[in-house]
């Protein structure tokens, strides 16, 4: 039981803290509402859980053999964050009326996790800490715990955004909020570059 509680604590600490996925969930909740944002939440959670499982099954060894692949993931993640920041910064501020391409999606959430070096680091660190011996049953148990906690964590950010939408009644306020979220994504990209280089 102590092991499972430790797994849950690690999953909570890495899932609930601010990062690109949670910033996008907050912004999505504010602009499109909680229910629509659950697509992003589900995609991000499934994307991370799949990444966690693959790292547990040995993908991290490929990264250690080919360090250039790690650098490519870092740069792809940085460019993706900057693209999302641009999308937010140039949004028109109409709540719930953004174009179909701007609405939250499963694929967008999953892709964000796969291009997020923080997700890769959390996966590798947690595998080393909890599933170091490669036991498949323990890997599945950890993935299930992580899935539930990650889903609840990202959903709480989307819910907080939905609650904020009550304060963002005018397009001008929404544009200000989106620009703040864009700035946070740019800072996240900068932080990833500092950590990765």
Image (tube, helix red, strand yellow):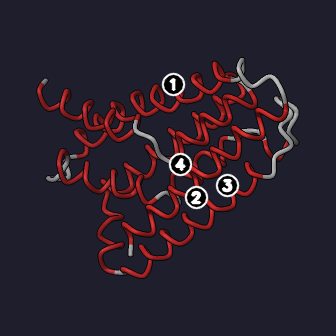
| Nearer-N-terminus badge (1/4) | 4
| Nearer-N-terminus badge (3/2) | 3
User: Foreground mark, 1 or 3?
Assistant: 3
Q: Residue 183's spot in the image, x, y percent?
A: 61, 52
C-alpha separation, residue under disc 3 versus residue under disc 2: 6 Å
Disc number at residue 20?
4
Quick one: quadrant of the C terminus?
bottom left
| Nearer-N-terminus badge (4/2) | 4
Identify which residue, 39 or 87, lies in the foreground.
Answer: 87
Sort mark 2 into few (<14), some (14-19) or many (20+) by Cα contacts within 10 Å.
many
Q: Residue at x 68, y 35 (%)?
A: 28
C-alpha separation, residue under disc 1 versus residue under disc 3: 21 Å
Q: Quadrant of residue 191?
A: bottom left
Q: Residue 190's spot in the image, x, y percent?
A: 49, 64
Identify which residue, 45 or 37, lies in the foreground.
Answer: 37
Secondary structure of the residue carrying numbered label 1? helix
Contact, mark 3 vs mark 2 (Cβ under 8 Å): yes
Disc number at residue 186?
2
Identify which residue, 62 or 196, lies in the foreground.
Answer: 196
Q: Is residue 70 left or right of residue 162?
A: left
Quick one: quadrant of the N terminus?
top left
Q: Is residue 108 above or below residue 55?
A: above
Residue that badge 1 annotates: 156
Q: Is residue 182 left or right of residue 118?
A: right
Disc number at residue 85?
3
| Nearer-N-terminus badge (1/2) | 1
Contact, mark 1 vs mark 3 (Cβ under 8 Å): no
């Amino acid at each position: 039981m102590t092991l499972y509680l430790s797994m849950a604590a690690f999953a909570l600490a890495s899932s609930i803290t601010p990062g690109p996925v949670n910033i996008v969930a907050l912004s999505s909740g504010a602009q499109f509402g909680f229910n629509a944002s659950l697509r992003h939440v589900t995609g991000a959670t499934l994307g991370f859980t799949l990444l966690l499982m693959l790292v547990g099954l040995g993908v991290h060894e490929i990264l250690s053999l080919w360090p250039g692949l790690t650098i490519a993931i870092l740069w792809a993640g940085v460019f993706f964050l900057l693209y999302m920041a641009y999308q937010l910064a140039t949004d028109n501020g109409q709540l719930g009326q953004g174009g179909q391409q701007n609405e939250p999606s499963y694929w967008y959430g999953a892709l964000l996790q796969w291009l997020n070096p923080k997700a890769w680091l959390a996966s590798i660190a947690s595998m080393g800490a909890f599933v170091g011996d490669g036991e498949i049953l323990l890997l599945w148990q950890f993935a299930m715990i992580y899935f539930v906690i990650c889903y609840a964590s990202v959903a709480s950010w989307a819910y907080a955004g939905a609650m904020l939408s009550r304060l963002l009644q005018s397009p001008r306020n929404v544009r200000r909020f989106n620009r703040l979220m864009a700035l946070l994504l740019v800072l996240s990209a900068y932080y990833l570059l500092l950590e990765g280089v």
